[in-house]
Image: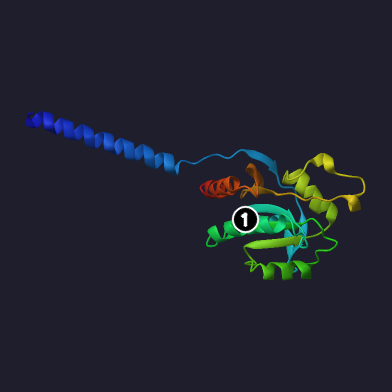
């Protein structure tokens, strides 16, 4: 093999290596555009520290939404355990928040929510437990977050009850993005974390 042939062989090997690494880098860092599913309507609730909590509170933030009730012994502890993994994963990112709404506001007072959050060792300004008017809480779950069938609305709100294992993901513009995530599935939790990172790149 002549020096000229060897030079070209080495040149093409180096070139192919550079192209391979470039494509791999771009694929890893490519922005994935998550679909828009819905939009957050204006709301006014109160958090576990008795602070006003509205849609404006979350402006410019990425947030995960869930519903629960404090006396639940079924899926709620599992859902909050799942959310705690998200909270830990993004603990150093002040733009990522978790909002857990009570579906039983008649029993889950602010004091009850505060004790529950303390028992779970929740970081107050990262994870909010909120309560408010039952009509508004349920309207948001069904019309904004798509966590329950809107057709489940009943004329008598006192007979109504939401018990859902699903999470919603909201972007900095107040749009529901990605998909509705099943909080009991590890694959969905991993996807949720990945989608949060994708929203951070936007």
Residue, x 66% and y 46% (percent of image)? Answer: 182
Q: Which of 181/27 is in front? A: 181
- Horizontal side of 111 relative to 61 (left or right) equals right
Q: Residue at x 22, y 32 (%)?
A: 12
Q: Residue at x 92, y 45 (%)?
A: 155
Outermost residue toward the front in this view: 74
Quadrant for the N terminus, please.
top left
- Whole-percent x, y for residue 137 in the image: 79, 53
Please give the count of numbered marks on the rendered protein.
1
Rendered location of residue 27, percent (x, y):
42, 39
Q: Residue furthest left?
A: 2
Q: Is residue 41 above or below residue 117?
A: above
Figure check: 177 above or below 61: above
Which picture quadrant has residue 107? bottom right
Disc 1 on helix, strand or loop?
Answer: helix
Q: Quadrant of residue 77?
A: bottom right
| Mark 1 surroundings: few (<14), some (14-19) or many (≥20) residues within 10 A | some
The reply to whether residue 49 is visible in this rendering is no
Q: Residue at x 64, y 39 (%)?
A: 36
User: From the viewer's perspective, is 43 left or right of 25?
Assistant: right
Q: Is residue 80 left or right of residue 138?
A: left
Does any portion of residue 25 appear in the rendered image? yes
Q: How is the image coloured?
A: rainbow
Q: Which residue is mark 1?
A: 82
Could you tell me residue 19's position as x and y percent? Answer: 31, 35
**Which residue ends up furthest to the right in the rendered image?**
156
């Amino acid at each position: 093999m002549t020096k000229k042939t060897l030079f070209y062989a080495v040149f093409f090997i180096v070139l192919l290596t550079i192209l391979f690494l470039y494509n791999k880098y771009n694929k890893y860092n490519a922005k994935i555009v998550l679909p828009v599913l819905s939009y957050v309507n204006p709301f006014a609730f109160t958090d576990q520290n008795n602070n006003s909590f509205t849609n404006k509170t979350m402006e410019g933030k990425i947030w995960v939404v869930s519903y629960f009730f404090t006396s639940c012994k079924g899926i709620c502890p599992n859902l909050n355990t799942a959310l705690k993994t998200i909270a830990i994963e993004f603990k150093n990112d002040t733009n990522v928040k978790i909002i857990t709404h009570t579906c039983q506001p008649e029993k889950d007072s602010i004091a009850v929510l505060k004790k529950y959050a303390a028992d779970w060792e929740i970081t107050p300004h990262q994870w909010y437990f909120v309560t408010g008017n039952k009509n508004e809480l349920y309207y948001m779950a069904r019309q904004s977050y798509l966590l329950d069938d809107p057709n489940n609305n009943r004329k008598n709100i006192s007979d109504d009850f939401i018990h859902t294992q699903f999470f919603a993901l909201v972007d900095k513009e107040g749009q529901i993005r990605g998909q509705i995530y099943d909080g009991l599935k590890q694959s969905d939790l991993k996807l949720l974390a990945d989608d949060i990172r994708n929203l951070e790149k936007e």
